[in-house]
Amino acid sequence: MLARFHHRVSKTPLPEIPLKYDLAFIRQTISACLLPLRLASIIARAVFAFLQSRDARMISLRISVEKLFMNEDVECPILEWKESDGTEIVSLFYFDDEVELKECSWVMHLGVGRNDTGSNCPLWQSSRVDWNVSQVSHLKILFGLAQHILGVLQWPIADARRLYGYSVSNQDSEEEYVSYANCSDLRQDDEIRQASILPSAGIEST
């Protein structure tokens, strides 16, 4: 499911970032998505450590945010980036209000060789799922969020706008985002959109 979600959202090109970036740049970019600086710092450290552990370098980055339908006070940041070797990554983050705010749970899908040739071909030449969660229930929330967004992306834009009150820009299409705001552009008309937690979600490898 995460492979399909990533394949769908990655149809929209990612904004390029400076060749020389650092932890502060990632933190500031995330914070610009209207997230508290403390949350942005935790996410930035997790992403930066993940990059360093693989000796990888970002070349493009996009930040978005979803509010959980069952708890609108909880925001789940979504980061997408592409690396210099062609690896594409989408990552979903979750903060548990019931525990001390020192770290976050996350799940990432890494894909190489995005395939658009046909429905009978694998979506990616190779892909994998990584995660780091403090509770197994957080995986259910994160996978459920991705599953819901993927479902909304199948809808006609008019239906999504009517149900959720979305403001879709003229550049958007059925092949682009209609389920969550692209905070990298800071477009005021793109309100942070709601997503429900589905009752179940599983882990799959591709």
Image (cartoon, rainbow, N blue to C red):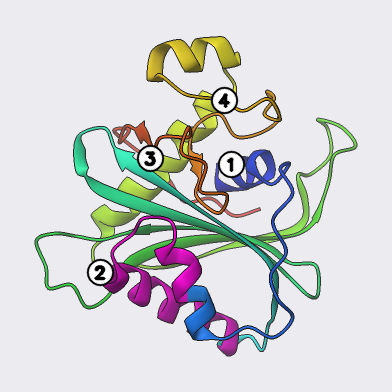
Q: Residue at x 21, y 38 (%)?
A: 72
Query: Dot 4 surroundings within 10 Å: few (below 14), some, or many (20 or more)?
Result: many
Task: Provide the secondary structure element on which disc 1 rests.
Answer: helix
57 in relation to 32, above or below: below
- Residue 33, given in percent of the width and then of the height, sits at 43, 56
- Residue 154, given in percent of the width and then of the height, sits at 59, 22
Amino acid residing under circle 1: Phe
Marks 2 and 1 in Cβ contact (< 8 Å): no
Query: Dot 3 surroundings within 10 Å: few (below 14), some, or many (20 or more)?
Result: many
Amino acid residing under circle 2: Ser
Query: Dot 1 surroundings within 10 Å: few (below 14), some, or many (20 or more)?
Result: some
Q: Which residue is mark 1?
A: 5
- First reached walking from the N terminus: tag 2 or tag 1: 1
Choose top left, top right, bottom left or bottom right for residue 178.
top right
Disc 4 versus disc 1: nearer the observer: 4
Q: CA distance from mark 2 to mark 1?
A: 23 Å
Marks 4 and 1 in Cβ contact (< 8 Å): no
Q: Which region shows up in magenta?
A: 27-52
Q: Magenta stretch containing residue 38, yes or no?
A: yes
Q: Residue at x 38, y 40 (%)?
A: 144
Q: Which residue is mark 4?
A: 168
Amino acid residing under circle 3: Gly
- Residue 138, given in percent of the width and then of the height, sits at 28, 55
Quadrant, the N terminus: top right
Marks 2 and 4 in Cβ contact (< 8 Å): no
Q: Residue furthest left?
A: 98
- First reached walking from the N terminus: tag 3 or tag 4: 3
